[in-house]
Image: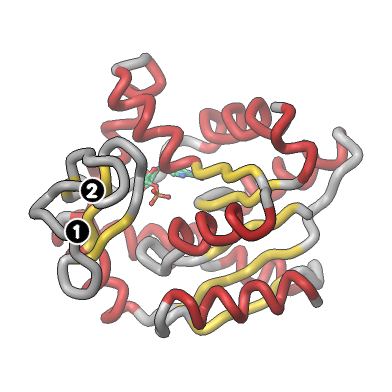
Amino acid sequence: MNIVLLGAPGAGKGTQAAKLVEARGLAHISTGDIFRAAVTAGTPLGLEAKRFMDAGELVPDAVVIGIVQERLSEPDCAVGFILDGFPRTVPQADALTKALASMGKKLDHVISIDVDRAALIKRLTARRQCRSCGRIYNVLTSRPKHFNVCDDCGGEVFLRDDDSVGTVTNRLDVYDRNTAPLIDYYRKAGLLRSIDGDRPADEVFADILAAVRA
Ligand code: AMP
């Protein structure tokens, strides 16, 4: 089963993707995680991506598309995958359709997780993430037991540079301009299911599971 998770920054794509991976054994492809790993490793890709990420802008389509095409051909994607944070523009969505067709594959579901802007700003500025395992926390609703230490792996829990108040507003504007049009794009393709994301994560997940079973 091949799934795209759509949603604004902070809508809960990463949290829901992790739950889906656990429940369905699918490969998790998060372009944001790929870029953050490249930044940490100091690779040329990381250096290029960092200036866009820090400004809350999108990394150029040609760069992202190449990375996703390569990732999709890795063996773990044969059983199915969840794309989290890709596509984010219409050219990326077109490239994805073509890349999948060339591999004899297609998307089965596109899930849009919907959360309003005020709630997104509150969530993003409260979000913290483990630098080692990627687990997501929230200083208002789900803090680690020990200050800035991950409950799961003991890694450092930190505030992403792009979750600062100034950058968050731009990221949401970028989403409205470039990514929100994909909702209509996939609705017209008959693939879209919209889920109310402004609820506890387990309730959102139950609806996602029902949508991908349907
Ligand atoms: P995320 O963790 O999905 O919020 O992504 C963090 C940042 O990585 C974004 O703000 C962009 O700068 C970059 N990024 C991730 N995915 C994409 C994509 N599909 N297209 C362009 N830039 C991306």
> What SS does tag 1 mark?
loop
Q: Position of residue 73 (x, y in %)?
A: 73, 28
Give residue 37's quadrant in the image: top left
Give residue 214's quadrant in the image: bottom right
Give residue 15's quadrant in the image: bottom left
Quarter of the image with the N terminus is bottom right
Numbered circle sitting on residue 144: 1
Q: Position of residue 90 (x, y in %)?
A: 62, 53
Position of residue 209 in the picture relative to residue 197 (left or right): right
Q: Nearer the viewer, residue 95 or 115?
A: 115
Name which of mark 1 and mark 2 comes first in the sequence: 1
Numbered circle sitting on residue 185: none
Numbered circle sitting on residue 150: 2
Q: Amino acid at mark 2?
A: Cys
Q: Are marks 1 and 2 in contact (CB under 8 Å)?
A: yes
Position of residue 182 in the picture relative to residue 163 (left or right): right
Q: Nearer the viewer, residue 1 or 164?
A: 1
**Ligand 1 positioned in quadrant:** top left
Q: On screen, 194 above or below 21? A: below
Total labels drawn: 2
Position of residue 56 in the picture relative to residue 184 (left or right): left
Q: Residues within 10 Å of mark 1 (few under 14, many from 20)?
A: some
Q: Position of residue 169 (x, y in %)?
A: 24, 64
Q: Amino acid at mark 1?
A: Pro
Q: On screen, 208 above or below 56? A: below
* Ligand 1 within 8 Å of the CB at mark 2: no
